[in-house]
């Protein structure tokens, strides 16, 4: 058991350190977290053999942490510790998947015995992991095309989260397929036979958005000539998908937070709350943490939405998927348009392979559809793609002049990345060297959250294992 990683979550430093000492004496590697939110961030990037969490904590409770862990890492046993020992809370914790439950004050022997039994149960579960068997034979999932490691992570997360009712926050650049993920979550859930309702939060004015979401009664405002059922109620029993949720106002954010907490809505002009039963999936192409720090997005709503985060990789990071997607779209549009297109000319394929796809999969789909229409023979030629971004733009050639605002944004982004990357590499490598290649300590020393530091390592393709001296 010496190499088992244990995560201890408690807002009391005395409890955290006490558990650390007890478990490290038994040979376990122990990490601690002072809040449920920070613990869940770590669980996005690290695998743990066991989690021990307090039940009563400010912000995110231990019960919420437990429910999220059962989705993120279902094979990981969770022990709940609390000073509020009642039969009711014990039963609820066990019902939600806790391995066991122990009340403060506890003895070292009680803790070590519970941990030993929990890890024995985990060893049995790992003998037959469903996800490994389920994903091993597939090159795609649901309506997705792609077999890259990056997309396998997405498929795995969908399978994990779909059977639950937990709120999901999908993040990713425009065109990466956020609505497809939302539909896949719905289609693989027990709500699949009920409505899937999608709302684009950027397409409606603020006053109309509230009316669309919550409904209104006749005469509640000018133009309300009849009572309208809100989309929360339309989606009752099913899934409500809020796309680009970062665009809603602070006022609507407050109302949405209340809906998530109370599971009821009050139409505009009414005083009678209406109970609802929906699964909420939200999506954004912006960094909500940044918006929280800027004061334009509520922190409490962010934590409510971010219980189960699902990040979609941009097309340029989906190694090996480009050819699969080209083949899929080529076949689809050739059949739709009655064309017999057998492939791309070598220079056309090379152009796509060197292109950064600022519009991601959606842009690739549009490019192939246009090329199928324009192709004069049975092969798509380079000029059929109508890509004005030349290869010297990808390399930052000084002679290239962007032709539209999207090309300008992409060229600027690439130039910035090339200029900043050497500094970022030096920054993280020096921090790691100063801290004996310990990621947690390096992140703390530099003032970064550990997940953010790890994300920077991933972006720079730095492997700590490979960089460490022998």
Image (cartoon, grey):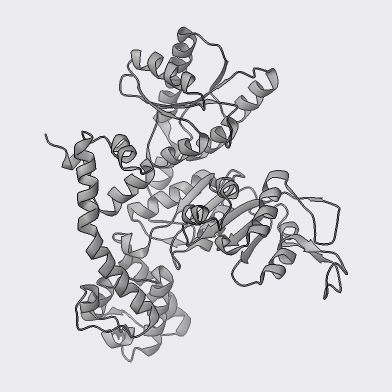
Nearer the observer, 419 or 72: 419
On screen, residue 199 versus residue 14, left or right, reads right
Residue 406: x percent and y percent?
38, 77
Q: Residue at x 21, y 74 (%)?
A: 396
The image quadrant where one finds the C terminus is top left
In the figure, 191 relative to 48: above or below?
below
Residue 418: x percent and y percent?
23, 64
Outermost residue, left side? 470
The image quadrant where one finds the N terminus is top left
Q: Residue at x 45, y 68 (%)?
A: 175
Residue 407: x percent and y percent?
34, 78
In the figure, 325 relative to 120: above or below?
below
Nearer the observer, 443 or 60: 443
Asked where in the image residue 313 lies, by quadrant, the reply is bottom left
Residue 155, visible in the rendered structure: yes
Q: Residue at x 31, y 86 (%)?
A: 378
Q: Residue at x 41, y 38 (%)?
A: 42
Nearer the observer, 276 or 330: 276
In the figure, 327 relative to 334: above or below?
above
Residue 138, visible in the rendered structure: no
């Amino acid at each position: 058991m010496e190499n088992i990683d244990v995560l201890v979550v408690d807002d009391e430093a005395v409890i955290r350190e006490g558990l650390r000492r007890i478990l490290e004496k038994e040979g376990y590697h122990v990490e601690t977290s002072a809040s449920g939110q920070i613990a869940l961030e770590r669980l996005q990037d690290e695998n743990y053999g066991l989690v021990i969490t307090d039940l009563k904590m400010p912000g995110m409770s231990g019960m919420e942490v437990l429910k999220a862990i059962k989705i993120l890492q279902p094979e990981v046993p969770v022990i709940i510790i609390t000073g509020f020992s009642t039969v009711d809370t014990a039963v609820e914790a066990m019902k939600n998947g806790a391995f066991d439950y122990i009340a403060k004050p506890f003895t070292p022997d009680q803790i070590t015995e519970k941990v030993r039994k929990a890890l024995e149960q985990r060893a049995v579960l790992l003998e037959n992991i469903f996800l490994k068997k389920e994903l091993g034979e597939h090159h795609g999932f649901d309506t997705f095309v792609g077999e890259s490691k990056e997309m396998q992570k997405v498929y795995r997360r969908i399978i994990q989260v779909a059977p639950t009712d937990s709120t999901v926050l999908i993040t990713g650049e425009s065109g990466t397929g956020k609505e497809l993920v939302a539909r896949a979550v719905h289609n693989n859930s027990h709500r699949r036979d009920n409505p899937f309702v999608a709302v684009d939060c950027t397409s409606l004015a603020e006053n109309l958005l509230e009316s669309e979401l919550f409904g209104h009664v006749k005469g509640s405002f000018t133009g309300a000539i009849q009572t309208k059922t809100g989309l929360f109620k339309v989606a009752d029993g099913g899934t409500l998908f809020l796309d680009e949720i970062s665009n809603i106002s602070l006022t609507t954010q407050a109302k949405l937070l209340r809906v998530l907490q109370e599971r009821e809505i009050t139409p505009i002009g009414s005083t009678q709350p209406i109970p609802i039963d929906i699964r909420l999936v939200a999506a954004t192409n912006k960094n909500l943490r940044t918006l929280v720090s800027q004061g334009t997005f509520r922190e409490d709503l962010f934590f409510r939405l971010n219980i189960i985060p699902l990040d979609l990789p941009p097309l340029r990071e989906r190694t090996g998927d480009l050819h699969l997607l080209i083949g899929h779209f080529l076949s689809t549009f050739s059949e739709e348009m009655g064309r017999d297109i057998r492939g791309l000319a070598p220079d056309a394929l090379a152009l796509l392979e060197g292109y950064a796809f600022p519009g991601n999969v959606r842009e690739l789909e549009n490019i192939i559809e246009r090329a199928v229409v324009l192709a004069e023979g049975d092969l798509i030629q380079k000029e059929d793609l109508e890509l004005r971004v030349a290869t010297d733009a990808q390399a930052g050639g000084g002679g290239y002049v962007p032709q539209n605002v999207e090309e300008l944004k992409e060229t600027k982004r690439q130039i910035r990345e090339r200029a900043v990357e050497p500094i970022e590499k030096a920054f993280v490598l020096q921090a790691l060297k100063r801290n004996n290649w310990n990621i947690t300590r390096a992140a703390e020393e530099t003032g970064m959250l550990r997940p953010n530091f790890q994300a920077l390592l991933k972006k720079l393709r730095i492997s700590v294992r490979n960089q460490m001296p022998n």
